Image (cartoon, rainbow, N blue to C red):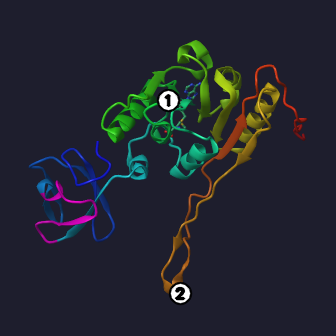
Amino acid sequence: MAYSGPFQPGDRVQLTDPKRRHHTIVVQPGGIFHTNKGQIAHDDIIGADEGSVVRSTLGTEYLCFRHLMVDHVLSMPRGAAVIYPKDSAQILVEGDIFPGARVLEAGAGSGALSMSLLRAIGDQGTLFSYEIRQDHLDYACANVDEFFGGRPQNWQPRLGDLHDVTVADLGGRVDRVILDMLEPWECLKVSADILIPGGVFMTYVATVPQLMKVMEGIREQRCFTEPRAWESLVREWRVEGLATRPEHRMNAHTAFLVMARRLADGVTPPRPQRKARR
Ligand SMILES: C[S@@+](CC[C@H](N)C(=O)[O-])C[C@H]1O[C@@H](n2cnc3c(N)ncnc32)[C@H](O)[C@@H]1O
């Protein structure tokens, strides 16, 4: 699938009308998009540059762009809640997802994080996406395949419980483990077993009790560095002359992020670990 250049048959194109409403179509030669503002011939879009304007038969103008990954993630069908783009961005940078990395994620859910990880690891990397529910795995596969225009060769979506995964299943240890599941503390032992020394462990949890439990669990494993926890808040601004101000609404809380690094085998954490206050 093309990510740049003039529109080609098969491209997913986002049309924006004068009221800033989005309509997404897949352009095909001879195709027609019907709106209550008239019709648009796909052939008027194919061959045009991104950012072009097409006019419907009733004269309404539509701005044409390809879908960005964020547009796809926020509009695609979901089986499970997705990781929001602001948090995926944190995972890519704080989790140091590099080209060629071997990464394991669980659960795959709707495939939102999978897409960001697949891009970041590039063709030389491998992403193992474990999902315990067949229906959720189906969503993940459909969403990822649709975005990339086919099954990425660096992706291994697998139906299964992370508890049961072994190094042999993965053909060796992985560089990064990223968990987005209800009870990540149940999978800390397996995460430690499959991570290389120095590897990054990250998890994404929505509530304070989950955060407390996973932080304590990581400390109890005694094979990780002291875990860090944080959240990211993104607030948009309306910039209109003297009326410039923050937007009234924001997605204030999505989830907390937790990160720790795997120590070398046989090493215990060098610093005293903080005890939970009861
Ligand atoms: C919130 S969703 C993940 C969403 C995903 N990160 C995304 O961005 O689309 C959590 C998923 O974890 C799966 N899950 C829970 N426990 C699991 C386990 N032990 N092994 C594999 N998948 C698991 C659930 O079935 C669910 O689909």
Q: Main secondary structure of the magenta part?
A: loop
Nearer the observer, 77 or 241: 241
Number of the front mark, 2 or 1 = 1
Quadrant (top left, top right, bottom left, bottom right) of the N terminus: top left
The kind of residue on which mark 2 rests is Leu
The kind of residue on which mark 1 rests is Leu
Nearer the observer, 75 or 197: 197
The answer to whether residue 129 is seen in the rendering is yes
Quadrant (top left, top right, bottom left, bottom right) of the C terminus: top right
| Residue 96 x %, y % | 61, 41
Q: Residue at x 26, y 53 (%)?
A: 5
Residue position marked by numbered label 1 in the rendering: 127
Residue 242 is tagged as: 2
Specify the segment rendered in magenta: 44-59
Q: Residue at x 78, y 35 (%)?
A: 225
The answer to whether 219 is drawn above or below residue 234 in the figure is above
Question: Crowdedness of circle 2 by 10 Å Cα count: few (<14), some, many (20+)?
Answer: few
Kind of element beneath mark 1: strand
Q: Residue at x 38, y 28 (%)?
A: 153
**Quarter of image, ligand 1:** top right
Kind of element beneath mark 2: helix
Residue 216 appears left or right of 2: right
| Residue 157 x %, y % | 45, 26
Q: Is mark 2 within 8 Å of ligand 1?
A: no
**Residue 47 within the magenta-colored segment of the rendering:** yes
